[in-house]
Amino acid sequence: METTAKFIFDGKTFEMPIITGSEGEKAIDISKLRQETGFITYDPGFANTGACLSNITFMNGEKGILRYRGIPVEQLAEHSSFVETAYLLINGELPVRTQLQSFSVLLNDHSLVHEDMRHFFNNFPRRAHPMGILSSMVNALRAFYPEIPERSEEEEINMTVTRLLSKVRTMAAISYKISRGHKVVYPKQELSYAANFLNMMFDSPVRPYEIDPDLVKALNVFWILHADHEQNCSTAAVRLVGSARVNLYAAISAGICALWGPLHGGANQAVIEMLEAIQANGGDVNPFIARAKHKDDPFRLMGFGHRVYKTYDPRAKIMKEQCYKILEKLKIHDPLLDIAMKLEEAALKDSYFIDHYLYPNLDFYTGIVLRAIGIPLNMFTVMFAIGRLPGWISQWKESMEDPHWKLHRPRQVYTGLNQRDYIPIDQRG
């Protein structure tokens, strides 16, 4: 088997090593390409560029495979909790019972937010998007919890990780309560991670919230399915910002900002808005499908297609099952689900969508589940951010420990004007 790739130019042959991953995927190591040949590669969107070696998450887009630390996401969604999955991603192995109990206790112990941070929440405009608030507040955490010199680097990282996992969930619930003008609900020691979040969101003095184990399970599954997804836009942002050796809070804040976009984390909100537009137009999906297929129409079907998956998103299958379970349990008839079913059925029969690998992705069903739970539309992307937090943290940790670490600094192919002289302002035509 060849161990090098050859690049031939102007009669000269240059050899570059071939790297083979544990699942057999191959990459050409071009780290010395410019040094040896004077060339760089041109790859808009980095679709063909491997920025790192990673042992966290494996994806196979052609076969619809997703595994965290080698464990299929289907098994984790069925048997695990979000806290256990977070431990797996961050530490590399599933915890034993005592480790899981200790981790859960730590998350509860650090779930309170400094009372002075309430002033920040109160001073954001009521119409401010929760993702902007969350990004700002995560950055602010650094000021409230500076590093302690007496701690070792490992202790400091573990403490920061615990704070982020516990407090981001609390801050998300606080931002929702304040936006409604309601009294803030504090976390309870006896509740699990997901149950605590639901209670902080929906409990009130006049209507105590009753914990439904099926809703807790659905939220755990939702967060597990979002926990990591290889080198996506927000994860790449966390690694890029982290490569400057900034603190973890700043790197995570960058990930939240990247996730905010409608083509990434904001897609779950965009799906609901699209389904509502179809409903407002009479519920007929065909005109929207026709628009999506028209090459000159900028409209696109949200929740269909993926940069990596060329088959049905494995996470979408799991979320679809949860969607039906929750709606049946709560006896909810959601007309948007009916439209979603029609849209999926029509798209999967259309050769255009099949030929272009436009299958439903995770975002297609998550919005309906979040609606059923009671999560408001502008909080959808925040829910994604809470779920993706363990992945961002594990990717940041891995990059910090990478012996081949380098400050991220992409190159460019300059296409501007050649050198020219400055013209004094009075001489310009």
Image (cartoon, rainbow, N blue to C red):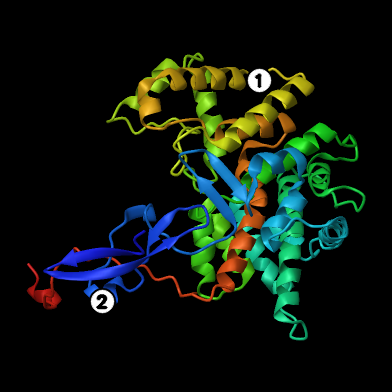
The residue most toward the right is 190
- Residue at 56 percent across and 30 percent down: it is 272
Residue at the spot of label 1: 334
Label 2 neighbour load within 10 Å: few <14, some 14-19, many 20+: few
277 sits left or right of 56 in the view: left
Work out whether residue 386 can be spotted: yes
Residue 322 percent location from the top left of the image: 70, 30
Secondary element under disc 1, as helix, strand or loop, is loop
Give the quarter of the image for residue 252.
bottom right
335 left or right of 31?
Answer: right
Instruction: Please tell me how crowded label 1 is: few (under 14), some (14-19), or many (20+) other residues with Cα within 10 Å.
Output: few
Distance between mark 2 and mark 1 Cα atoms: 61 Å
Q: Nearer the viewer, residue 324 or 279?
A: 324
**Mark 1 is on which residue type?**
Asp
x, y (%) of residue 349? 43, 18
Q: Residue at x 39, y 20 (%)?
A: 350
Task: Name the front one of labels 2 and 1.
Answer: 2
Q: Which amino acid does label 2 sit on?
A: Glu
The residue shown at (44%, 30%) is 301
The N terminus is located in which quarter? bottom left
Q: Kindly indicate whether the residue at mark 1 contacts the one at mark 2 (C-beta within 8 angstroms).
A: no
Query: As displayed, is residue 360 above or below residue 421?
Result: above
Badge 2 marks a residue whose secondary structure is: helix
Instruction: Depth check: give the residue in front, 311 or 21.
Output: 21
Q: Residue at x 43, y 43 (%)?
A: 307
For the C terminus, give its image quadrant: bottom left
Where residue 23 appears, x then y in whole percent? 51, 52
**Taking 381 as reference, is 420 above or below it?**
below
Residue 88 percent location from the top left of the image: 71, 56
Disc 2 or 1, which lies upstream in sequence?
Answer: 2
Q: Can you say whether 154 is above or below 76 in the image?
A: below
Residue identified by numbered label 2: 36
